Image (cartoon, rainbow, N blue to C red):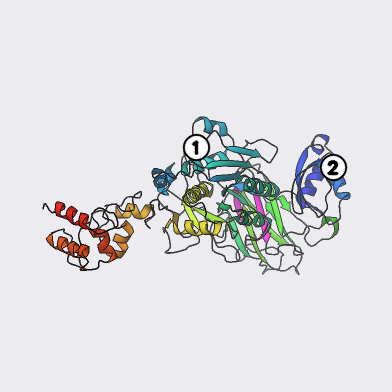
Amino acid sequence: MIEGRVSEHVNRVSNIPALASKPVTIILETDTLLATDVEAQGGVVRYNQGRLHEISIPAGKLTKLLSRLPSTTLARFPYHHEAVSVTGQGVAKTGAADMQAIGNSGAGIKIGIIDLGFASLSTAQASGDLPSNLSIIDYTGTGTGGIDHGTNVAEIVHEMAPGASLYLAKISTEVQLSQALNDMAAAGVRVINHSVAWFGAAFYDGTGSICTTANSADSKGIQWVNAMGNARAAHYLGTFTDINNDLRHEFSTGQNFNTIILSAGFPVSLILNWDAYPSTKVDYNLYLYNGNPDNGGTLVASSQNKQSGSGPSYFPYPYESIDYTPPSNGTYYIVVKKVSSSTTNLPLTLFSTGPELGKFTPASSLLQPADCANVLGVGAVDLNDSVEYFSSEGPTTNGNPKPEISAPNRVQTSLTSSFAGTSAASPHVAGAAALLLAKNPNMTPPQLRATIQAAVKDISTAGFDFRTGFGRISLDADGDGLNHDDELFYGTSPINADTDGDGLSDWAEIFTYGTNPTVSNKGDISPKGAPDGKVNISDLLILTRFVEGLDTPTIREKLLADMNNDGVLDIRDVLLMRRLLGF
């Protein structure tokens, strides 16, 4: 069995020796694979994950290799994926600066960053924006460079938790993703950031091979943090509808196409899935035209895997994709078609990796593995706490709540003045997770998730919502129950749980006693049960009765009457209050 894109590539290069001998990366799905069979065709088995095997093989030798493997073997390209960026302020915004001010830098915690490229890494290290002693592994065989996306992500993590150790991994396939996780677990990593979005492995409902990998981090003691994606306006979700019986899906009443505006020379990928995983006989196809297909538009690209076929041409996954680089600017037309009138009408989703779609669906526009149950999905807000237009929304397609949390983006790194997208939001949460683990290293991933989801400022609909989750990350450095934004609002110190030093925590003064947390109430215990805001002879008399055992103080009275903060009411407290009163 072979994916249509793979078959087309092999046919295209088979008569061009220079291209036929050029290695391609293929994922083989089979229970039985002998490395010697691959090596006999000039290839190599690079990584294995269960029945998934990543091989590199000359394109012209793939057909011969498949002829020697079981007929149930599937050959496909790796799943589509993209870095989810749109192009030090977040450190203060999230309260990480407060943590650092009291000595918590994340020291002792190891953070993994799995990304698609770390170009300019040495530049960032030379400038001091990344540490010199980080670890990096290239799983792709192409070097650690390429794009600088991962370097920008790493800088944000390092700014948030400068004492944490960084472990970087460059990957390009889902098999490499699994291998990177396993290696990081062996190295003792506690948090992984993955600012990458994956398409096509499942119906974005928390299932499939990508979620199998990401969810397994929990059992390894690792919290996985992931960008939600930037596809809010580049996503369509609906159920196949064909009222006019022309086999084409109607994206809206009477319109059997979607549109996308493309620019010459800028590649785009279109990914179609339908809700028939893990395998299907329901067959839809995907087409791209350079004009209205009902008015002279020309077909420029298509994806026609044979889900309804059998034998070597059968492709079991409900998945079609087009990779296209337009030769000219213009509006292009997308058509989804079923192979026959008897084909079942199922929910389907369409993503663009580039421009917005003419007909788009904000809801459930999240990508994998942000949809996975054990993963913290992170949405993006700007530095004014406005939700970013592009930030993908929940819920998952089966209704599970996502994202869990949101964080700032459009922040400066040494490589760009504005690193934008959920790619920039996610590492803020990963860094925050490291700070929380440094404070309490014994937390399990579920406990850490609960702690992070409580450390927020609610910036949108009260409570949970599908754009910001429970809110924007806001840490409570001093542990007084007030997060960074609460402290700013009340004027209290974010690094001192008792701003006025009167023995009452800021939280208790605000929410229990209704007193001013910035003005000391020390010694104010009279009238008993209703202090008057002044310290005078009446307070001294009540304190004396407490010390002599004639009255029993409440918890609050004991705190306020304990003038030397030693936890005991005795003659020393009486003498200190007398001195305060001038006696």
Q: Residues within 10 Å of mark 2 (few under 14, many from 20)?
A: many
Residue 33 picture location, percent across and down: 83, 50
Residue 297 in view = no
The residue at which mark 2 appears reads as 61
Mark 1 is on which residue type?
Thr
Q: Main secondary structure of the magenta part?
A: strand
* Horizontal arrangement in the rendering, residue 378 relative to residue 285 (left or right): left
Q: Residue at x 62, y 44 (%)?
A: 187
- For this rendering, which residue is in front, 412 or 479? 479
Residue 153 picture location, percent across and down: 54, 43
As for residue 420 lying within the magenta part, the answer is: no
Above or below, 16 against 219 in this view is above
Above or below, 24 against 457 in this view is above
Residue 533 picture location, percent across and down: 18, 60
Please report whichever mark, 1 or 2, sits nearer to the chain's N-terminal start. 2
The residue at which mark 1 appears reads as 416
As for residue 267 lying within the magenta part, the answer is: yes
Mark 2 is on which residue type?
Lys
Which residues make up the magenta segment?
A: 255-274
Residue 172 picture location, percent across and down: 67, 44
Q: Secondary structure at mark 1?
A: loop
User: Image quadrant of residue 351?
Assistant: bottom right
- For this rendering, which residue is in front, 258 or 119? 119
Furthest residue toward left: 583
- Quadrant showing the N terminus: bottom right
* Horizontal arrangement in the rendering, residue 311 relative to residue 505 (left or right): right
Which numbered disc covers residue 285?
Answer: none
